[in-house]
Image: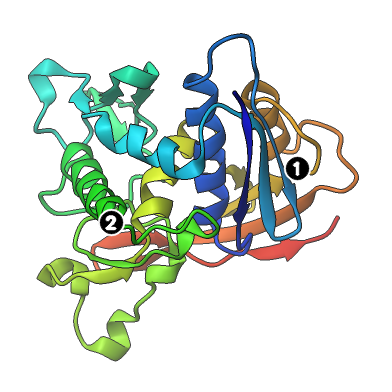
Amino acid sequence: MSTSIRIPVNLHNPGEFLACCGVLEITSRATSGGVTPCGRFDQSVFELHDAPVSILDMLRKLTDAEPMSGDADESRNALATLAILPFRLCLDWWREPGRGKERWAKTRFKLWAGRQTSNTIYTTLRTTLAQSLAAEKVRADGPFALRSPLTSRFEFDPGAAWNALDAGFSPNDQGYGVQSSPVVELLAAIGIQRFRPIPVSSDRDAFEFVAWSQPLPTCVAAGAASGCVPDPAARRFRFRIASRGSYGCFTTATEITR
C-alpha cells in the first residue's frame, strides 16, 4: 500500500534540496509491485506520491542498512566508494579519475579533510540518526529540523554554519561537535549521487539547482534538477562552496531568475 509524504523544505538550503532528492532516490529503490514514486516541489514543501513507506519507516530502513566499502583494497582511503547493498546503491560522488600517477582525484563536492573517510562520516551520521529515531526525536512532519552535535559530516547543511574567524579556531579541526542535521547530511549524500548540482562556468565555486514543480519519477527528476526538463513554474537557486579552515562547505542559496 502506497502513501504520500510531505516534507517541509527550505530551498535556500542546498542540503535540504539534495536531501529531498535522496528521499526520492531511496523510496524509488525500495518500491515493488510496479508502483513508481514521483516527487515535486511546491513552494516550501516537497511532495512524494506513491511512496512505499512513511518517511520515518524509510529512515529506519536506511539506518538498518550497513554501508560497505566498494573498494576492498582501499577501505581506509578517504575516497573509497560506499555500497548500500539493500538499496543497490553505490556512492562515489566525491571522486573522479585522476591524472598522471593518481588513480583518483577528489571532486569539488568532497569537502571533508583530516583523517575522516567517506565510510566514517556515513557511519557517524547513520548511528546518530538511528539513536534519534529510537528516542523518537525525528518528526514525520519535519524530519530536517532534527539537530545533533556532529564531529563528522559531509558539509552539505549550511545550517551548521560557523565563522572560524569570529570563533578564533576551526571546530572541525579541533574535533568539536557542531549542531547539524543528520537527516539532511545523510539523505543529501544519497541525493547528490544522481542529482548533481550544475557548475556555473563563470565561477568555479558556484553551483545551481532547479526545484521542479511537476510530479516526476527519479530518472526524469534528475534531469529536471539540472534544468533539462521544461517547467515554467520551476525555481532556480545558486550557492557556493566556501572554505572553513581546511574544510569546505555549502553556503545558503539565492534564488535567481532568468
Colouring used for the render: rainbow
Say what amino acid the circle numbered 1 marks: Trp
- Residue at image point 56% right, 39% down: 21
In the rendered view, would you say 104 is above or below 148? above
Secondary structure at numbered mark 1: loop
Secondary structure at numbered mark 2: helix
Residue 185 placement (x, y as % from top left): 38, 51
Q: What label sits on residue 40 in the rendered view?
A: none
- Residue at image point 76% right, 34% down: 215
In the image, 37: left or right of 105? right
Disc 1 marks which residue?
212
Q: Quadrant of residue 176?
A: bottom left
Q: How many marks?
A: 2
- Residue at image point 47% right, 21% down: 30
In the rendered view, would you say 163 is above or below 257? below
Q: Residue 205, can we see it?
A: no
Pick the quarter of the image with the N terminus. top right
In the image, 129: left or right of 54? left
- Residue at image point 76% right, 61% down: 256
Q: Quadrant of residue 77?
A: top left
Question: Which residue occupies the extreme front position in the image?
Answer: 1
Observer-nearest of 85 and 228: 85
Q: What's the CA distance linking mark 2 and mark 1?
A: 31 Å
Residue 234 placement (x, y as % from top left): 81, 47
In the rendered view, would you say 31 is above or below 208? above
Dot 1 crowding, Cα within 10 Å, few <14, some 14–19, many 20+: many
Residue 258 placement (x, y as % from top left): 86, 55
Task: Report if the CB atoms under discs 2 and 1 are less than 8 Å apart.
Answer: no
Disc 2 marks which residue?
132
In the image, 205: left or right of 120? right
Observer-nearest of 44 and 15: 44
Q: Counting residues from the N terminus, which is met first, the one under dot 2 or under dot 1?
A: 2
